[in-house]
Amino acid sequence: MHIASDRLRSKLSEIELRHLNQCAECNSDYQLLTQLTDSAENSDLINPPDLVWQKIQYSMANKHQPQKTVWRQLSVLAASIVFAGFGWLVVNNYQLQSQLELVLQVNQNLELQLFENKLPSYRQTQLLNEVRLLESRLMNASSTKEKLTLLKRRQKLIADMVKSQQGNQYEFSI
Amino acid sequence: MNSVFKKSYKTLLFTLTLGLTYTSSVSANECATVKFKANTIDNDSYIINVAANNGQPVFGFLDEKSIAGSPYYYYLEEGQHTLTIEKWPIKAYELYKRYKGNGKRIPPKKWDSIIKDSKIETKVIGLNVKAAHSYDLSLYSTALDAQFELLSATPMACIDDVEEVLPAKNSSTIVNSSKELLPVTLENRLRQTMTKISQFHQAQSTKKEFSNIVPLGVNFEFGAILDRDYNAGNIKILSVLPYSFASKLGLASGDIITELSGRSVLESKVTANAQYLKYLSSIKINKNVKIKIVRNNKELELERKFVPVILPEARYLFNSNQQDEAGSSSLAQRNLVSSATLSYPLKFEFDQTILAVSNFYNEQGIKQGTVHLNRMADQDPNYGLAGDLIQLKQSRGLRIARIVDNSPAQSIGLREEDIIITINGESISGLSPKVLSEKFIKLNAKSTYSLSIIRANKILELTGVYQPKVLAGFDLNLDLSSVAVTTRLLTEYAKNERRIGLANDRFLNPSRFKQESDTQYYNGVNNRDQGAREQARTYSGSGRNN
């Protein structure tokens, strides 16, 4: 076991000195540290360049204005929140628009299957009644989300109309 | 708005010219006299003006004859009539007359104010008159929407020099179907619809007998809804109503309209939606509608001739006392049938059913005269559900897809998506579809029965008294001739390339606008400008839809 390096910088005990004499590795480390310490103590002090002093002064000056720093941090935080919110809205709107496009595509496919007969059947008339009521609400829908909700409900009704038209009668009609 | 009015007014004059050809001269003993009593409503005096007879305009819109303050007589040929009646506040009428009396043309703005500010209301009544009789009619209450009532019908010859007699309609009964039924599905549809209407009237009135006239209707709806938030320059379709003109044209949800009748939407300075509405307003009867669209990145050209759907006039009578075919009352015996407004969904259903029935007779070659359908009250043999057998863990069940309104299935508490597993304790698992159907059909009236069902993964027991649905008895007349007359009128308009303006619509279907403006439904061809909509608010009654 060797002497810990932080211990080499302080005054050594008798046991540590005895180990130092016997352990070449610890002895070498001790010698190196001693030389470094001596060298540092005998070196001349170097005056830092003006630029360094200016930076220090600037740094000190700013430390005396903690209010401004808080505001800056808050501003950065607010900007980040706004940016994140805007980003979320853009992404959310994009997602809603994508969903809307998808629903319209499905509805279109269903509608194109539907327009075959001259007149709607009784069942289709009942479904048409519900479609008309939904569409009257759709006309006044103010958000993409609302449109999406109404169009999805409409989709089910049109799908039922297609099913009814295709003669997919229920096994029981009693 | 002014330009809209001018065009409408020109069309009105054209209509009046047509109207003059439909009056005739008869002797004093061949006609009936009809008199309307002036009325006071909310302290305002109202006069009655007959605007049209059997869909044809009556000599001069508010003729200069002095009808204010004293009853005015109309002379009618013996037989059935459908009269379109306007109630005018005397103040508005006098304003109108002041201009007419001076030989001036009423400025459009003034006309607008007369129409808009006045509580002018239009009613339709069915009259059945005998020659050499006089009929006195009045509103039965002081409410603005009150119906007319017949005060008296007394023998009295017409005056000697009657020149203008309103002709009766061709009411010859072509089909008198009391026993001969329609095809099964159509018969069932008619009976279900009429039963709903009967229940509607019963809920509205305590009368044992109820009659109604549903005026002829012309459907001008286009049937497409735009995405108002779409801002890429073109027009985007959000939905297309099945069976509407837009759907028959070939439009579908998600289509992008790029050209309207050869004109690029993008090149116009007007907004896309405004262009769309303007284009709809320019559509004429029997003329082609041409629209270019982009669908799935492909350009398509859609083209179709615009022919509005015409719904025949219908009259019906429900009589809870009716015991047999020669019951105490029938439509033929009634002198007066007033119009009552049905709920919006119910009217739509009625219109579609009437259209299906008249279409059936048209296909049989019957296109003129009156179809008379008489049905006695009866028990509905159907239980009132539809569904499929499905496999459960250990047995089979009947999953319900549809429940008929007011049916035994509904009254016991069944709901869509319920799964029936037993009837009166007997599992339905091993039963064939035929045997299972018989189990329901053979339930005795007023007998208690039970069903085990699965609802939301829980087994429930439903118990109730089996009460078959009662199908209402009714007397129904469909006037197929009304369609022929209107078709002829519309063809005349089309030949002259006239748009169907407000002034003419009041003869064809006086009340349609109110409903469309109330519901703000569809950018229909005839619901195309704000001016028309605003004026339309003055009209009321029962419109027709398809």
Image: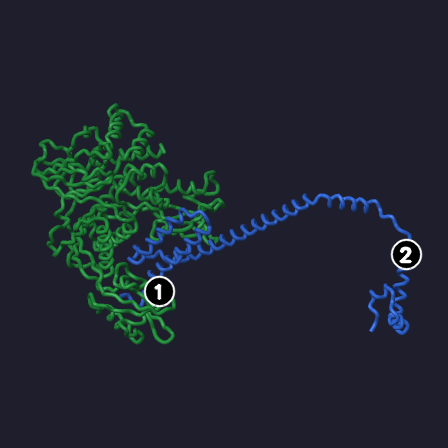
Residue B526 occupies which quadrant of the picture?
top left
Whether residue B331 is situated above or below residue B395 in the rendered picture: above
Residue type of the residue flagged with mark 1: Glu
Give the percent coordinates (x, y) of residue B235: 45, 46
Determine which of the numbered discs, if any, sits on residue A149 in the image.
none
Single out the residue that lies furthest toward the top: B102
Specify whether residue B497 is in view: no
Determine which of the numbered discs, if any, sits on residue B417 in the image.
1
Horizontal side of B520 relative to B480 (left or right) equals: right
Give the percent coordinates (x, y) of residue B395: 35, 75
| Scheme by which the image is coloured | by chain
Q: Nearer the viewer, residue B502 or A134?
A: A134
Q: Tell me the green chain.
A: B
Q: Nearer the viewer, residue B206 or B106?
A: B206
Looking at the rendered structure, whether the residues under marks 2 and 1 are on a common chain is answered as no
Q: Tell me the blue chain.
A: A
Residue at screen point 32% across, 57% down = A124
The residue wearing badge 2 is A41
Q: What is the chain letter for disc 1?
A: B
Q: Nearer the viewer, residue B3 or A21?
A: A21
- CA–CA distance in space, label 2 to label 1: 93 Å
Horizontal side of B133 relative to B338 (left or right) equals: left
Whether residue A102 is situated above or below residue B456 in the rendered picture: above
Single out the residue that lies furthest toward the right: A42
What crowding class fits label 1: few (fewer than 14 Cα within 10 Å), some (14-19), or many (20 or more)? some
Residue B160 occupies which quadrant of the picture?
top left
